[in-house]
Image (cartoon, rainbow, N blue to C red):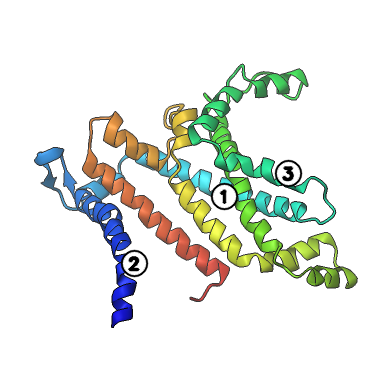
């Protein structure tokens, strides 16, 4: 009994703080999603806010854009991080520390700062277009920020640049704990680099790949900073994400906090669905 009291005394403050600042706001947001209005003029509207989602063209555009980012960017980033981690785990590679730091550095860069830099890099008269034009790779400047297709490409490139190194660190840490004799045995048996990667490296990293896939999915579904600072959701709603739409509903348009709360819980539902799918695909039976 005494040990239980001592244990709870250590976690009690943290439990209270988490309840007040995490669970209570979530419960309030859920209640708010069934209401409409502002301040003290809130009225209960039941499921009207959720029904409204299906006929809201801006929400439909936002969810389509978010899915595009998710389907293209997350697999691309995971594969890149895997390949880079394998290359940087090579014992014979020189300046490994320098390469690891350089690739991980974007992950600790300010979200706003790097987004603004990308905005200038991919401007019509930016460095990227100047480089491509100078070497005659493109006939005319690409409208990276004003063309619906290229604006999405810019956002995907920005997210990939920032988070690939972050995921790489997880894979690299796991690879350094793998017994080197396993790879040596594979080479003796005549396995080539691709076979070693697919038959040994991937299975060994399976739990870490699942973890990074889930965290990357959650991050992409909540993407906001890059879009807000690079394209502001434009052109039109071509790059608007769900999180940015929630911001617009709350602070840019005529405030509709009840509807914004309903949209936010769509993200929660999507996160749960994709997490369950990823566990099933990975074969996790727990």
Q: Give the image quarter of residue 58.
A: top left
Q: Is residue 228 left or right of residue 35?
A: right
Q: Which residue is mark 1?
A: 74
Relative image position of residue 161 (x, y in whole percent): 61, 39
Q: Which residue is mark 3?
A: 99
Figure disc tally? 3
> Could you give the CA–CA distance between mark 1 and mark 2, rounded to whole angstroms?
38 Å
Relative image position of residue 216 (x, y in whole percent): 52, 52
Q: Is residue 107 visible?
A: yes
Front disc: 1 or 2: 2
Q: Nearer the viewer, residue 188 or 15?
A: 15
> Could you give the CA–CA distance between mark 3 and mark 2, rounded to whole angstroms?
42 Å
Q: What is the quadrant of the N terminus in the image? A: bottom left
Front disc: 3 or 1: 3
- Residue neighbourhood size for the residue with mark 2, other residues' Cα within 10 Å, grouped as few (<14), some (14–19), many (≥20): few
| Residue 190 image label | none
Q: Nearer the viewer, residue 235 or 111?
A: 111
At 72% from the left and 50% from the top, the residue drawn is 84
The extreme top residue here reads 125
Relative image position of residue 214 (x, y in whole percent): 51, 58
Mark 2 secondary-structure assignment: helix
Q: Nearer the viewer, residue 212 or 157?
A: 212
At 61% from the left and 16% from the top, the residue drawn is 125
Mark 3 secondary-structure assignment: helix
Relative image position of residue 81 (x, y in whole percent): 66, 51
Q: Which residue is mark 2?
A: 10
Reading the chain from its start, which is encountered first: label 3 or label 1?
A: 1
At 36% from the left and 54% from the top, the residue drawn is 268
Q: Evaluate if marks 3 and 1 touch, with contact meaning CB atoms under 8 Å apart.
A: no
């Amino acid at each position: 009994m005494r040990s239980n009291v001592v244990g709870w005394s250590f976690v009690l403050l943290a439990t209270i703080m988490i309840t007040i600042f995490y669970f209570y706001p979530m419960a309030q947001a859920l209640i708010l999603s069934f209401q409409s209005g502002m301040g003290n003029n809130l009225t209960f509207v039941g499921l009207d806010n959720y029904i409204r989602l299906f006929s809201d063209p801006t929400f439909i555009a936002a969810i389509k854009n978010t899915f595009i980012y998710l389907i293209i960017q997350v697999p691309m980033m995971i594969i890149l991080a895997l390949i880079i981690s394998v290359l940087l785990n090579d014992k014979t590679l020189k300046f490994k520390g320098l390469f690891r730091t350089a690739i991980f550095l974007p992950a600790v860069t300010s979200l706003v700062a790097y987004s603004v830099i990308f905005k200038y890099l991919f401007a019509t008269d930016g460095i990227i277009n100047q480089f491509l034009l100078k070497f005659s790779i493109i006939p005319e400047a690409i409208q990276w920020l004003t063309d619906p297709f290229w604006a999405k490409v810019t956002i995907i490139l920005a997210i990939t640049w920032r988070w690939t190194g972050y995921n790489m660190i997880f894979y690299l840490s796991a690879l350094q704990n793998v017994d080197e004799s396993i790879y040596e045995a594979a080479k003796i048996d005549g396995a080539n680099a691709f076979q070693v990667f697919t038959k040994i490296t991937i299975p060994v990293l399976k739990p870490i790949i699942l973890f990074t896939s889930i965290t990357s999915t959650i991050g992409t579904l909540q993407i906001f900073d890059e879009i807000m600072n690079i394209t502001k959701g434009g052109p039109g709603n071509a790059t608007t994400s769900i999180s940015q739409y929630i911001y617009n509903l709350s602070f840019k348009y005529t405030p509709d906090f009840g509807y914004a709360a309903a949209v936010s819980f769509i993200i929660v539902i999507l996160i749960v669905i994709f997490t369950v799918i990823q566990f099933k695909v990975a074969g996790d039976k727990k």
